[in-house]
Amino acid sequence: TVLIIACPHALGLAIPLVVSISTSLSARNGLLVRKRLALEAARKLDWVLFDKTGTLTMGEHGVTDIWATKGFSKEDVLHLTASLEQNSEHIVGKGIVRKAEADHVHLDKVTNFKALLGLGVQGTIHGNEVYIAASYRYIEENNLTVPSDIAKAVKQAAKEGKTEVYLITNKKVVGAIGLADIVRQQSKQTIKTLKEMGIKTAMITGDSADVAAYVSKQLGLDQYFAEVRPEDKAAKVKELQKNGQKVAMVGDGINDAPALTQADIGIAIGAGTDVAIKSADIILVKSDPQDVVKVISLSKATYRKMQQNLVWATGYNVFAIPLAAGVLYGAGIVLAPALGAVLMSVSTVVVAFNAQLLRRTSLG
């Protein structure tokens, strides 16, 4: 009877069954788990760090303002900027090109095109070197001066959460374009839910501090990092990991890959780049930031089921084995082998049934 009861069916099924069901449940909810341990660790998160563009926002910038200096019209600024940006893969550049196409602006051919990571793009149009500075840092590093009228307008636009790019020719700033990125409605609910779960939230972006502050205020984030170069994103993750805190990084771009790798859990948006997806532990197929909450909820639910199954499987053996060994023989209680087989089978069924209940878990 002892040998029958000690057969570790229930104990052997306690964890694998839950793992199998949770993997299936994650797939049905649009969560592709590439590293199983990442899902199990999600319940211990202290911080969730979001990339701004394309993750917390729609990632589709639209032109809202065009400013030009004397000697250049707004059409000239849009024409040169869009011509250069037609070779760019960045969403800001795509937004400018869409504006030019909507206004039926002819785009010139660009030669010697080059992307300046975290700073902008450059190229040659009709023999003239043209630069698009996506960060004011480029202006400072090259000792350029922004005309006062443009600087004033850009400053006001930045306070409204808009992104600005500067058009530079002959080492002079001749114009600027303001764009706005729409914050996803799901992002607001995501941040709210994470706070209710006791998890802190932060945002990282290469945009200006004013833009970052505006978006952060809209969403109610605990912290933000602005004007961060692509190569510095991983360092910001390390900063949050101080004192052993667990950090999840959510991103979609090639620039997010080092940070996704550095984080305790890397979560990639499904619509992101291949590099970001391959660097991530978990992929959100629907590109919905609210699915981050699902990851954490599934992690906690899975862990609870594992605990319940282990408690049952272990408790059953702790109770039944001494009984089968004759602890209560003196009281006339003897466990027959047939009854032991029934108890062993019942324990296995209970563990399997309890694991199946995980399928009914609502991830929100």
Image: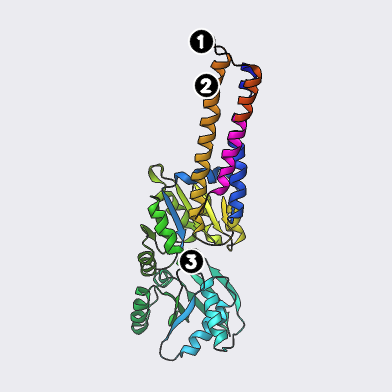
**Residue that carries the numbered disc 1 in the rendered image:** 331
> Relative to 257, does residue 154 appear above or below in the rendering?
below
Q: Residue 349 location in percent, x, y?
A: 62, 34
Q: Nearer the viewer, mark 1 or mark 3?
A: 1
80 inside magenta stretch: no
- Badges 1 and 3: C-beta atoms under 8 Å apart? no
Q: Quadrant of residue 105?
A: bottom right
Question: Which quarter of the figure has residue 204?
Answer: bottom left
Residue type indicated by callout 1: Ala
- Residue range highlighted in magenta: 347-362
Q: Nearer the viewer, residue 56 or 364?
A: 364
Q: Determine the CA span between mark 1 and mark 3.
A: 73 Å
Question: Which residue lies under the disc numbered 2?
Answer: 319
Give whichever of 297, 90 is nearer the camera. Answer: 297
Classify 307 as above or below 322. Answer: below
Mark 2 or 3 closer to N-term? 3
Q: Residues within 10 Å of mark 1 (few under 14, many from 20)?
A: few
